[in-house]
Image (tube, rainbow, N blue to C red):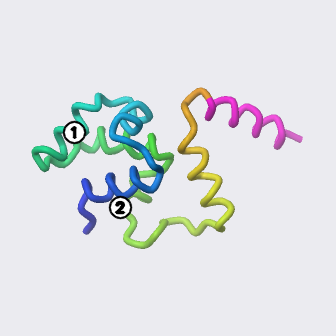
Amino acid sequence: MKDVLDEIKRLREAYHWTEHDLAERAGLPQSTISTWYRKRQIPTILSLDKICQGFGITLSQFFAEDKESVPLSDDQHELLQRFAALSPEQQKIFLDLFRNLTSV
């Protein structure tokens, strides 16, 4: 089973995010995230769900033992990573644009 705190750190570093960046995207106080590491506390499932939303992944993907629970092409994986790195406002703009491009 994965170490939850190590996985959060691995994902955060993969996105080149600070704890502050993650807290902002997940809608959690940075002090909460810092406390998890300082006291080696496991986040609640509600907090972990917010963390996953911040990363743009599901809880299932977070806990998947393989790289991802749903097979993605390299392009799809890159798209999700780049989308997750956007601010919430940029994500909304992108989704609106994408919806307009794909509505036929």
Which label sits in the foreground, 2 or 1?
Answer: 1
Label 1 belongs to which residue?
34
Q: Residue at x 54, y 43 (%)?
A: 85
* Residue type marked 1: Ser
- In the depicted structure, whether residue 67 falls above or below residue 98: below
- Mark positioned earlier in the residue sequence (2 or 1): 1
Q: Residue at x 44, y 59 (%)?
A: 61
| Disc 1 element | helix
Indicate left or right for 104 with 13 as reference. Answer: right
Indicate left or right for 53 with 8 as reference. Answer: right
Q: Residue at x 26, y 56 (%)?
A: 4
Query: What percent of the width, then of the height, locates residue 12?
Result: 39, 50
- The part of the chain drawn in magenta is 90-104
Q: Quadrant of the N terminus?
A: bottom left
Magenta-drawn stretch contains 102: yes
Give the number of the disc on residue 98.
Answer: none
Q: Residue furthest bottom?
A: 66
Give the number of the disc on residue 63.
Answer: 2
- In the depicted structure, whether residue 40 falls above or below residue 69: above
Q: Residue furthest left?
A: 39
* Residue type marked 2: Phe
